[in-house]
Amino acid sequence: MSIPRTIKEAAALIERREASPVELAELFLERISSEDGKINSYITVWEEAALEAARKAEKQISEGNYLGPLHGVPIALKDIFVTKDSRTTCGSKMLRDFVPPYNSTVAEKLMASGSVVLGKNNMDEFAMGSSNETSYFGPVKNPWDTDRVPGGSSGGSAAATAANLCVASVGTDTGGSIRQPGSLCGVVGMKPTYGRVSRYGMIAFASSLDQAGPLAKTVEDAAIILSSIAGHDPMDSTSVNLPAADYASALSADVKGLRVGIPKEYFISGMDPEVEKSVRKAIAELETLGAEIVEISLPHSRYAVSTYYIIAPSEASSNLARYDGVRYTYRCENPETLRDLFFRSRSEGFGDEVKRRIMLGTYALSTGYYDAYYLKAQKVRTLIIKDFENAWEKVDVIASATSPETAFRIGEKTEDPLKMYLSDILTIPCNIAGLPGISVPCGFSSEKLPIGLQIMGKPFDEQTVLNVAYAYEQSTKWYEKEVAPPG
Amino acid sequence: MEYEAVIGLEVHAQLATESKIFSSSSTKFGSPPNSQVNPVCLGMPGVLPVFNERVLEYAIKAGLATNCEIAGKSRFARKNYFYPDLPKGYQISQYDEPLCLRGHLEIDSGDGKKKIRITRIHLEEDAGKLVHEYSDFESHVDLNRAGVPLVEIVSEPDISTAEEAVEYVKKLRTILKYIEVCDGNMEEGSLRCDANVSVRPVGQSELGTKTEIKNLNSFRFIQRAIEYETKRQEAVLRGGGKVVQETRLFDSQKGVTFAMRSKEEAHDYRYFPDPDLLPVVVEEDCLEKIRLSLPELPEEKLSRFADEFNIPKNDAETLSSSRPLAEYFEECAKHAKDSKAASNWILNEMLREVEDEDSIAEFPVKPEDLAELLNLIGEGKINRKTAKEIFSEMISGGKRAGEIVTEKGLTQITDEDEISSIIEKIIEENQKEVERYRNGDTKLLGFFVGQVMKATKGKADPAVVNQMLRKSLEER
């Protein structure tokens, strides 16, 4: 049996009885055990639980209760999703021993779809990072070149998917954390509209920006996962009460007459010329397929990174206050006073990047600075949103590069946070405006490193975004041409 | 130089909803530690708050009953600080966009009515509590109270004395209990208050430096703490010193306030809008519905009672001071032929039989049965003394007045012939006293009345007996 690379392939094997869910689970667990030492894409592997879920799926299917395309398919979850009775660390020493008594809605929905969860993927600590180097559990390596980063913060999910250590994974995206690693690892990564997927049980980084989404090898697989995790959740007040569509069934490669906006500000100076070339070629491909290419302007997007680095740390500084050493978190040894307990537990439990952002956010929210920073950032956020609203009058989707560069070397940017923050310059506006965005592979650099094309869409119009990505993917089939070696 | 106090109060009232403000956990008081909790009120990673609509309804009622404007859109904000009883490291509260604004209450002060303005009422969640009783060197955390819904009612500094402060809190408590949004139980912490106190020379318009006294949970403590603090600040100023702006606590044992933390140590709460919650929108039709559901408030009840039932203002005020009492009175007055008699009986005879106003609803004598008793007095069938005995029996035995009267033959003797023959007999038997009476010792009338009542086992109508005795004694 050859290893299934996509959900479709795995589902077909199961349907034709060529492989059972248990066989598939065993196959992937073996791969993880033999190959993941090189990639480090998992924090916790669910050997027992995965086999148990697979046996359950097998029984259901043999009894004629087939639940759909994810039934019996081995997938993974970023370790930011709370999973009942199974350690959930968020990549942090702070939560290294945290075993939650409840499930995130995303985990619950995936399990209800019959999928077999193989384990929890490595990630930047509390999703803060663009390279997966901030994880307490060590950096993740890019399967295309293990000296390089996979991107972040969902680096474990992207690397595991690319190296076929799972068929697909679910990650989260606050400023590009699904799309940028998707781009750097050569897989499809999608961030849905803010409010499309429930945030309940997804450990919060920046509440007004966080959104869960799929990492998969094909657009169709991403659509299948999105359909299974999307939808209103009464446990999340910000989840939107709109019916979630069957995105995969509705996929269409017909983009004739569709207007694709190209924001002139998004071809920034300092961009890797090979990336620019691939992206321009991809846009030309869309034109060949019948799309109309329209140059547009998003003038306030240049302030998106600065805006993001006020809003996200501000929210994070408050969201992470609960990790105080009192209850389920890491606690320092022999605290002398209450202050000492708080101070040392947090100093020892959090890594540098997390502490940096907590301090940034605490500062931005302080009396006397609030108006100048937080309030101003909120105003700029409104301007960025307005830009997009204007653009939607002229175009149906917007296309750009996902990341201005290909995967960089491990350690290359760790000493320069500002340089690191610019990795997300093209993905952040989408989060600021709450829009759906996808990264789809669009070629390779001369060093055989993947490049990603980003498609952004109107709020809650995931279908059009998926369709454009699908049209491009089906006419180029990069995912068939190259396969990431597992290290 | 004369000094005057300027006082503003922040009253925290627990809303009496079944479940917490942002989670489905129960709000039940007195349960074992950490038994009324779930991941949401424990602030575990990834959980999200969902606003309990019932809390909104209760808070709007509180706003309407205190003459506030209700904001069409208000917002939750996070108040950030670290403490072990605060599981998320922030309290969800409202900051610059509260639910209710610009209300007022009228209180009785020494010189008539006084209007106390209410700045705002906002919603917030309560914190848990630390328990120190299990160990000498460890503290434990009980989070049952974490997430219990509160309203904070903030007054303008319109209060001038400790008495007015108590009067204001009492009034507020009555209203909140009336509209059934808060049980008003100060011992259990359902109602507590912080007092902002400053003093200034009489005639000076600018305010003095204030201190805040935290967590006063009884009327007596409010009174004593404010009195002490006012005198303390006055003494500081008279001695040429300056009042330090600080947070203070009241030591009820010693009767003094003491500094908890100064302004320099004050927290920077870093308020910002809570991104996990949507703005609270109150539509006009929803507001109207709540407005219509409000019961008659104490003030309105007071004047209606005075007019409709023709009873003195003071009595009307007491009767309208609690909703169960007012309802009891009104029901009784409806059935009683004399509403004033109903008022008097309830105030003088009944109130001492009930533990507190809240237990009136369970009082064994139903208001219509009390009315029956009062009507028997009114019709002259029994006298007040007999009525009191019957009343005690009604309380203990659950029987109705008419039944007891019939069963025990307690009907008052009003038949003049019957009384007349008894009087004749008594005059016969007490000739010496009759002589003395006729010689001017009219105080002896009481003796004769007593004799008649004794002979009739108390069933004779005292008024009739009085009148007839006088007549018989003076006739000859």
Image (cartoon, coloured by chain):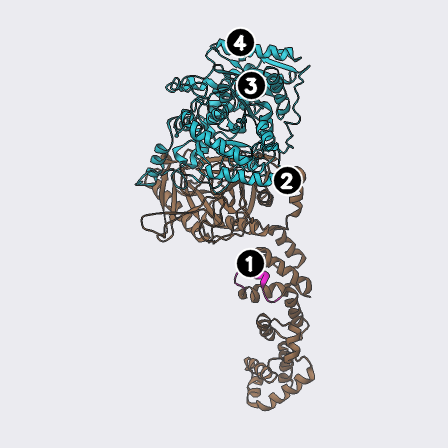
Chain colours: A cyan, B brown
Q: Which residues are magenta?
A: B354-365
Do discs 3 and 1 share a chain? no
Q: Chain of mark 1?
A: B
Residue identifier under label 1? B358
CA gap between label 4 and label 3 equals 21 Å
Whether residue B357 appears in magenta in the rendering, the answer is yes
CA gap between label 2 and label 1 equals 62 Å
Residue at x 57%, y 66% (from the top left corner): B350
The answer to whether mark 1 and mark 4 are in CB contact below 8 A is no
Which amino acid type is shown beneath numbered disc 1? Asp
Q: Nearer the viewer, residue B216 or A463?
A: A463
Residue identifier under label 4? A277
Residue identifier under label 2? A64
Mark linked to residue A480 = 3
Place of residue A30 in the rendered image (x, y in percent of width and height, measured from the top left): 46, 31
Which amino acid type is shown beneath numbered disc 3? Glu
